Amino acid sequence: MCTRSNLISHSKGGYAKSGFDTKLRPDPTRSASADQAEVAATERTASCVVVNNWGEQLTNVTLRHRYRNNPEHQQEMTWPSLSTGAISTALRVQYWTGIGTGFDYWWIQFEDARGKIWSCKQNFYCSLESEDGGHTIYFFLSGAAEEMQIQMISSGCEVSLYQS
């Protein structure tokens, strides 16, 4: 027979195994509010560099990071010129990991040697993880594939680039 005492006595830590009895004795591992989730999040930073593998010099290269796609949590840098094969100086980005955290959104735009403007879609996200903190994240611009590839410690992502 399933009783409250049976559920509690057989569960880890003496808390109910299901949500049915949580009003009688809430399980703190399953009842975190949005406010508690923010407290559980850890703020981290990483350095981001753009690598020009486009095959020609690029100008007005802008990389933008937004945590949760929120302009209030945005970091952005523009490099006036990036030679073929060159690696940009670093853009330091701020992000959060842990319970209740959101995605990291990225956007890039640049001008090629023929004056064409290239960019990725506005809603592209590739999330940083805890192990990426304190490391360098590489953003490779590939002219042959017309894409941007992101290389980080935790994983990697890619997105197509389009002429504006």
Image (cartoon, rainbow, N blue to C red):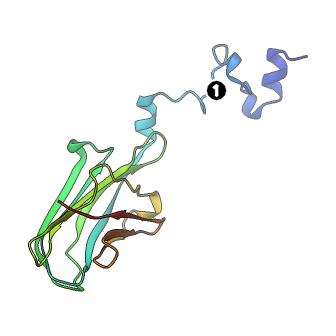
Q: Position of residue 35 (x, y in %)?
A: 41, 30
Question: Which element is circle 1 on?
Answer: loop
From the viewer's perspective, is 64 left or right of 14? Answer: left
Residue 61 can be seen, yes or no: no
159 vs 105: above or below:
below
Query: On the image, which quarter does residue 161 sit in?
Result: bottom left
Can you say which quadrant of the picture contains the N terminus?
A: top right
Label 1: how many Cα within 10 Å (few below 14, some 14–19, many 20+): some
From the viewer's perspective, is 109 left or right of 2? Answer: left
Q: Which residue is mark 1?
A: 27
From the viewer's perspective, is 119 left or right of 133? Answer: left
Q: Position of residue 118 (x, y in %)?
A: 19, 65
Q: Position of residue 12 (x, y in %)?
A: 75, 35
Nearer-the-camera pick, 39 or 77: 77
Identify the amino acid type marked 1. Answer: Asp
Residue 56 can be seen, yes or no: yes
At a point 45% along the width and 36% down the height, the residue shown is 37
At a point 48% along the width and 65% down the height, the residue shown is 155
Can you say which quadrant of the picture contains the C terminus?
A: bottom left
97 vs 164: above or below:
above
Q: Residue furthest right?
A: 1
Nearer-the-camera pick, 133 or 126: 126
Number of marks: 1
At a point 21% along the width and 55% down the height, the residue shown is 75
54 vs 29: above or below:
below
